[in-house]
Amino acid sequence: MKKRILAIETSCDETALSLVEAHGNLSAPKFKILKSVVASQIKVHRPFGGVVPNLAKREHLKNLPILFNKLIPKSQKLKAIDMIAVTVGPGLEPALWAGITFAKDLSKKIVIPLVGANHLEGHLYSFLLAKRAKSQKLKAKQLFPAVALIVSGGHTILLEMDSLAKYKKLGETRDDAAGEAFDKVARLLKLPYPGGPEVEKLARKGNPHAIAFPRPMLDQKNYDFSFSGLKTAVLYYLRDKKLFVDSRQFAISHRLKADVAASFEEAVIDVLVKKTMRAARDTKAKSILLSGGVAANRALRNRLQKEAKKLGIQFFVPDFKYNTDNAVMIAVAAYINFLLGKKYRLIARGDMNL
Ligand code: KG4
Ligand code: ZN
């Protein structure tokens, strides 16, 4: 049975809407992206060096009706939609409420059922949007058990997946998320927000082996991560070298700045990849699924892909546009939960997890 889903995502600093046609059962769900729109708030938050929750809410409230009219022009009929899905968590609560309230009003007005979606499940299931997942029939036997790594601005989670319905957390970060570490190091290097893509750009010009930053928790026999010490190591390195004069001055050559970025990136990737590969070997995984904003990092994608190939297992990562926050992944998560009969309450839950 086909389901046309209108999905809404406002958990952080992207207002995103999508219209997705989903069909198929849990062993072979298929998605046709009819339209996807995203309004980024980068310019609004950039002067503050990070996301300001109430500004995010204000921007979502402003952007939602504009994006809705873009997604579904007035001439188009709304009757063709079967379900509205909205992110209920995790994220910034004022931002989440903006989306939930908009979705509730819409669902009442056009009399279409509304369901809540978990942002992290959106990332987790986004591998279903990978080109390779579309071009080949996703045969469960070849895919599961899988190891999934979600790396975003708020989360770093490693999971074991036995099927789309059954997954278990293996480990997660004990402090900063990987994306958060990228953003914090970007700030130390006086790079603009959001820091991840900026650090990556700079890292391409540097030597990843120039500075031996620590690989936190790499030798521990668990699947947890810790990135706050790594960020501090970068801070101390800059201070010790008298490169970080004070908060206003910054006496660092472009060359060294690139080496710091590259060496930091290498340390993060080393930990993420080695722990993920260990989990894959331990669980006898048949595939590795990478998702979340940090999955947009080319060096991480390439390393993980190479390691998966070495181990003779499959690797899935969605297109770049579906790594960072978007509403297509929310439609995907809503459809999987519809098939599973799993429901979320329509209230904002900032600390929701998997
Ligand atoms: O999934 P996402 O868009 O939002 C959350 O759910 O948090 O992830 C955003 C995070 C930010 O920390 C951002 O700096 C990071 O993903 N990020 C990157 C890259 N692109 C985005 N980190 C490293 N390299 C990138 N290319
Ligand atoms: Zn996200």
Image (cartoon, helix red, strand yellow):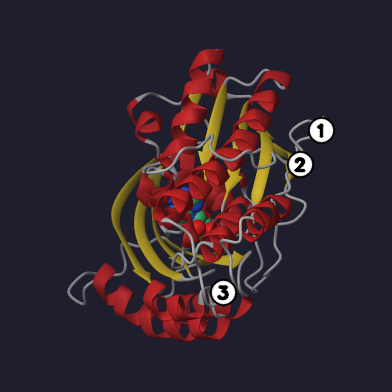
Tell us which disc is closer to us: 3 or 2. Answer: 2
Residue extending farthest to the left is: 75
User: Which callout, 3 or 2, points at the residue further toward the start of the chain?
Assistant: 3
Q: Position of residue 269 (x, y in %)?
A: 57, 38
Q: Which mark is residue 224?
A: 2
- Label 1 CB, ligand 1: below 8 Å? no
Mark 3 surroundings: few (<14), some (14-19) or many (≥20) residues within 10 A: many
Residue extending farthest to the right is: 221
Q: Is residue 176 left or right of residue 36?
A: right
Q: What element carries label 2?
A: loop
Q: Where is residue 202 in the image (x, y as percent from the top left)?
A: 40, 51
The span from disc 3 to disc 1 (Cα, nearest Å) is 36 Å
The span from disc 2 to disc 1 (Cα, nearest Å) is 8 Å
Q: Which amino acid does label 2 sit on?
A: Asp
Q: Position of residue 167 (x, y in %)?
A: 69, 38
The residue wearing badge 1 is 220
Q: What residue type is labelled 1?
A: Gln
- Label 2 CB, ligand 1: below 8 Å? no
Quarter location, residue 67: bottom left
- Say if 76 sits above or below 140 in the image: below
Q: Position of residue 36 (x, y in %)?
A: 32, 59
Cβ atoms under marks 3 and 2 closer than 8 Å: no
Q: What element carries label 3?
A: helix
Cβ atoms under marks 2 and 1 closer than 8 Å: yes
Residue shown at the point (43%, 56%) measured from the top left: 253
Q: Nearer the viewer, residue 261 or 15?
A: 261
The span from disc 3 to disc 2 (Cα, nearest Å) is 28 Å
Q: Can residue 113 be seen in this view?
A: yes
Q: Residue 96 carries which label?
A: 3
Mark 2 surroundings: few (<14), some (14-19) or many (≥20) residues within 10 A: many
User: Which callout, 3 or 1, points at the residue further toward the start of the chain?
Assistant: 3
